[in-house]
Amino acid sequence: MVEEATGPQPAAQMGIKGLTEDQILRGAGGAVLEGLTDAERARVVEYTPLWFYVLREAEVNGRHPGRHPGRLTGVGGTLVAEVFHRAMEGSRISIVEHPGRRPSLPAHREGRFKPTDLLLCAFEDDPALLNPLG
């Protein structure tokens, strides 16, 4: 039998401050977990599915009503960053593989090319297209 990771497990392994019991159960206006018994609530806190944990983490860390639903931080942000980093490391044509290579795309800030510059290039140098929620 394969056990799925719970949200609190990678938080502990990564040394990231995990969500509190209240944050897992109540969040910040997202999924409502009312109507659970005390035993069910305890199980949700102890065995929070990773996908739910990441969504709840984004909800409580950076939610701005009317602007955007939240930000990937902590476990979710680290997992996404690790996936991209591993993909770049595994690519034979990645700039990570050739550290002396410099992109020919324009740098928008501070004279240094950053990942946000690549995204802006992909979205026609229009921040509103890149981040339609503001």
Image (tube, rainbow, N blue to C red):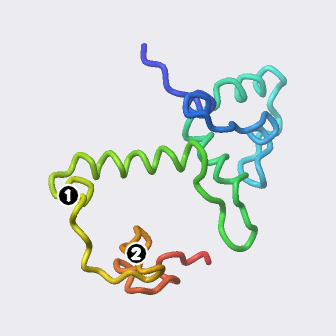
Foreground residue among 58 and 11: 11
Foreground residue among 125 and 52: 125
What residue is at 80 percent from the left and 31 percent from the top?
36
How crowded pointer 2 is (Cα within 10 Å; few <14, some 14-19, many 20+) is rated as few
Foreground residue among 38 and 121: 121
How crowded pointer 1 is (Cα within 10 Å; few <14, some 14-19, many 20+) is rated as few
- Residue situated furthest left in the rendering: 92
Disc 2, SS = loop
Q: Position of residue 94 (x, y in %)?
A: 22, 58
Disc 1, SS = loop
Q: Tell me whether the residue at label 2 lies in contact with that at label 1, contact meaning CB atoms closer than 8 angstroms.
A: no
Image-based side of 58 in relation to 22, left or right: left
Which of the 4 image quarters holds residue 106?
bottom left
What residue is at 73 percent from the left and 52 percent from the top?
60
Image-based side of 20 in relation to 94, left or right: right
Can you identify the residue that label 1 sits on? 98
The quadrant of the rendering that contains the N terminus is top left
Amino acid carrying label 2: it is: Arg
Q: Position of residue 38 (x, y in %)?
A: 84, 23
Question: Residue 6: which disc?
Answer: none
Q: Position of residue 86 (x, y in %)?
A: 32, 45
Q: Earlier in the sequence, mark 2 or mark 1?
A: 1
What residue is at 60 percent from the left and 33 percent from the top?
15
Can you identify the residue that label 2 sits on? 112
Which of the 4 image quarters holds residue 114?
bottom left
Image-based side of 85 in relation to 69, left or right: left
The quadrant of the rendering that contains the C terminus is bottom right
Amino acid carrying label 1: it is: His
What residue is at 82 percent from the left and 35 percent from the top?
35
